[in-house]
Image (cartoon, helix red, strand yellow):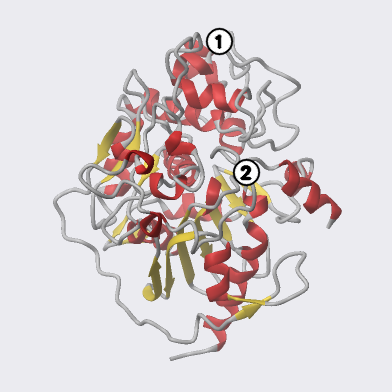
Amino acid sequence: MLRLAICLALVGSMASAQTGPVPDAAASDPVAQGWMQGEPPPADKIIRFDDGSAFKYPQWRWSLSHWRELAPTTDIARGAGPVSKLPRAERKDIDAISFMPIGGTQPMTWEQSLAANYTDGIVVLHKGRIVYERYFGALKPERPHMAFSVTKSFFGTIAATLIEEGKLDANARVDRYIPELKDSGFADATVQQVLDMTTALKFSEVYGDPNSQFMDHARAAGFMPRPADYKGASGTYAYLATIAKQGEHGERFTYRSINTDVVGWLIARVTGKPPQEVLRERIWDKIGAEGDAYMLIDPAGTVFAAGGFNPRLRDLARFGETMRLGGKFNGQQIVPAAVVARIAKGGDPERFAKTTYTTLPGGSYANQWWFTHNEHAAYTARGIHGQAIYIDPKAEMVIARFASHHIAGNVGIDPTSLPAYHALAKHLMAKRR
């Protein structure tokens, strides 16, 4: 509990600090608050990227459902095929499911957990059927939402597929494919070490500090506004070349978003196509998505592979269901079964344990996915502020969630999410329609 409290105290938000008590989900509802409503909106209700108001709380709760209106993006087209069906079999008994939060002393219901996590939208699939679906605030079923680091799992899956196809060598040095990184800390890291985030780099993933290296990365990538006197890297790839090595690769897991931008660059190098185009061809064009998605781009047009994907919620669930079904969905094998099987095994818990994740004891990380190693072998794609795809193979359950929590790190969100997911999984296994 002490370790968890320390972690919670240290976790900052990418949104600007809130003075006084943080408004709860109801009080910070962006529609009720009137953000960006009216023609034109009142001056005190306008949200902009350049002045940083898009990153303030509670404005943040509007921004994550409207990022295309704030910054440059590029399309991920859904393709011309029909929308894949997700049969509906809604259940009335889910809201009342009870569980004990991590470190808690009082039980919480599923419905209460949605508000506690500032949920914008959530879809639950059981055996491929929608059994639960809710939307809140600024999010609607037809509106894309920022997925943040859930993006990583898409590109990790694509890279693992390219390895399976022999187009990418997991054991090759990064500078074999990207000579532009020959003088950086990435040069002698292997492709697999980058995928598993066991690289040893001088980079700290601190979200709340405006002077942190993560913020330098975000500014270079075009995700955060640049000050008038900005003298940093001109884009994502230019920034990656400045990263120094610190330690020995392969010894421990350390979460660093810059690894995924290297993954995106590797994908581009071996396919000859921008990573977003590979994502479209290999996944988005095949799952029968309901709508186009989009991705953030830097001033050079490079996508923010580390966290810039904005899809619709049900389409996020479709990808989760594809993984649950061994890569086969919408009548075709979208991800090779061998790739899904290798991903689902997870990573090395010993390397993971060297970095403290109090809410994931015994967990691991590999191929840009997180693994619980719980009794159901559940694994998940995770993004700051509460984005998630949660796959429970044993319960035949997939959860897709968008959120706009005021805390960035999952350590502030997991205590009322992970036990809720597991309680729902057991409920669905025990209660049959």
Q: Which image quarter holds the C terminus? A: bottom left
Upstream in sequence: badge 2 or badge 1: 2
Which amino acid lies under the numbered mark 1 shown in the image of this protein?
A: Lys
Residue at 28%, 42% (x, y): give it. 280
Q: Which residue is mark 1?
A: 182
Q: CA distance from mark 2 to mark 1?
A: 45 Å
Q: Position of residue 142 (x, y in %)?
A: 26, 58
Q: Is residue 250 above or below residue 350?
A: above
On the question of residue 383 being in view, the answer is: no
Within the image, what quadrant is residue 331 found in?
Answer: bottom left
Q: Position of residue 28 (x, y in %)?
A: 48, 56
Residue at 39%, 31% (x, y): give it. 49
Q: Which mark is residue 31?
A: none
Q: Which image quarter holds the N terminus? A: bottom right
Describe residue 52's horizontal placement relative to residue 5 as left or right: left
Within the image, what quadrant is residue 197 found in?
Answer: top right
